Image (cartoon, grey):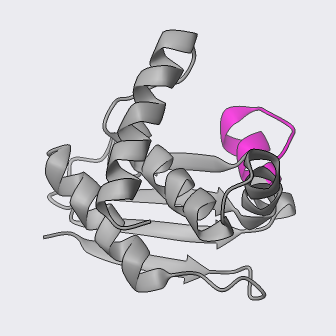
């Protein structure tokens, strides 16, 4: 079973940490992902913009970025990091008229599904991914 770490660097946000850990474990299990460790890090727009610029050459904040840290390293442990912008989650929860905790859950699910090979570049891919996100967050009780 993977070790799940939730780090909230956005101190003013109250996060349902235990429920999010359950969600991560559920998705890893159902999508048959064999990570030994998954780190979910909640940050602000400024931080995620820096990460987006440095690693993906996009100079703007985004809602979620996933990294497979053991891609090119021949090691036994398989580690992933998912960065989530709390600022984006706040804005998106207002825009989509959903509870903040539900938007956070959707972004966590979205990040893990990217690690599972799901993509969201086309309308068809976005729809498939959105359905899978909804399935997982509902099953986890969000």
Give the dominant element type of the magenta stretch: helix, strand or loop: helix
Quarter of the N terminus within the rendering = bottom left
Residue beneath the point at 52% across and 23% down:
126
Residue beneath the point at 59% across and 63% down:
104
**Residue 31, relative to residue 3: is it above or below?**
above
Q: Is residue 104 left or right of residue 139?
A: right
Q: Is residue 82 left or right of residue 140?
A: right
Q: Nearer the viewer, residue 60 or 13?
A: 13
Q: Position of residue 125 (x, y in %)?
A: 46, 17
Residue beneath the point at 48% across and 33% down:
130
Q: Is 50 in the magenta?
A: yes
Q: Nearer the viewer, residue 12 or 79?
A: 12
Whether residue 78 appears in this view of the structure is no
Q: Is residue 20 left or right of residue 84?
A: left
- Farthest residue toward the front? 97
Quarter where residue 41 is shown:
bottom right
Magenta stretch, residue numbers: 49-61
Q: Is residue 141 left or right of residue 31?
A: right
Q: Position of residue 86 (x, y in %)?
A: 73, 66
**Residue 55, relative to residue 103: is it above or below?**
above
Q: Position of residue 98 (x, y in %)?
A: 67, 57
Q: Position of residue 90 (x, y in %)?
A: 78, 63
């Amino acid at each position: 079973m993977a070790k799940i770490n939730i780090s909230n660097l956005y101190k003013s946000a109250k996060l349902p940490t235990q429920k999010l850990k359950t969600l991560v474990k559920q998705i890893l299990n159902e999508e048959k992902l064999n990570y030994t460790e998954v780190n979910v890090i909640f940050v602000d727009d400024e931080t995620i913009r820096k990460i987006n610029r440095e690693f993906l050459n996009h100079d703007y904040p985004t809602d979620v970025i996933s990294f497979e840290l053991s891609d090119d390293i021949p090691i036994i442990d398989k580690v992933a990091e998912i960065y989530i912008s709390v600022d984006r989650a706040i804005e998106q929860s207002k825009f989509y008229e959903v509870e903040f905790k539900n938007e956070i859950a959707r972004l966590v699910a979205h990040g893990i599904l990217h690690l599972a090979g799901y993509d969201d570049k086309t309308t068809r891919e976005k729809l498939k991914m959105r359905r899978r996100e909804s399935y997982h967050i509902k099953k986890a009780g969000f």
